[in-house]
Amino acid sequence: MAKDAAKNTKDAKSSPSSPEVRISAAAQAAGVSSQTIEYYIMIGLVEPIRHKGRSGRFFDEKIIRRIRLIHELNETGYTLQNIRDIYLKPPKKTRLENV
């Protein structure tokens, strides 16, 4: 399954005619369900790169990698709230930046 996901992700990335994929192909490439991606969208963890009507949400390789990382972090014990905080909080300033 992981090999299939990697292959689909590679195909989505390398195909010049389809650098963007619909939610079902993105889900397969990331190793999650379409419902999982819809939930990630709902809670603000990811956004499609563009919309085309109600069912036409498109994702690129960068978003697919992010979905995969979110899923892996969640599987290893991070809550989705923790992951969201990591993505949405600005980095802390260093001492030199505060001067």
Image (tube, rainbow, N blue to C red):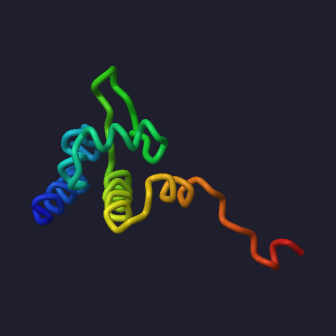
Q: Position of residue 28 (x, y in %)?
A: 18, 49
Residue plotted at (43% across, 63% down): 78
- Horizontal arrangement in the rendering, residue 30 relative to residue 76 (left or right): left
Question: Residue 37 appears in which quarter of the rendering?
Answer: top left
Residue plotted at (39% across, 39% down): 48
The residue lying toward the viewer, choosing from 77 and 12, is: 77
Residue with the most extreme bottom position: 96
Q: Position of residue 97 (x, y in %)?
A: 81, 73
Residue plotted at (23% across, 50% down): 32
How many marks the image carries: the answer is 0
The residue lying toward the viewer, choosing from 68 and 39, is: 39
The quadrant of the picture occupied by the C terminus is bottom right
* Vertical placement of residue 8 versus 58, above or below: below
Question: Residue 39 appears in which quarter of the rendering?
Answer: top left
- Horizontal arrangement in the rendering, residue 85 relative to residue 77 (left or right): right
The residue lying toward the viewer, choosing from 14 and 47, is: 47
Residue with the most extreme right position: 99
- Horizontal arrangement in the rendering, residue 56 relative to residue 8 (left or right): right
Q: Position of residue 73 (x, y in %)?
A: 38, 64
The quadrant of the picture occupied by the N terminus is bottom left
Q: Position of residue 86 (x, y in %)?
A: 55, 60
Residue with the most extreme top position: 53
Question: Residue 7 appears in which quarter of the rendering?
Answer: bottom left
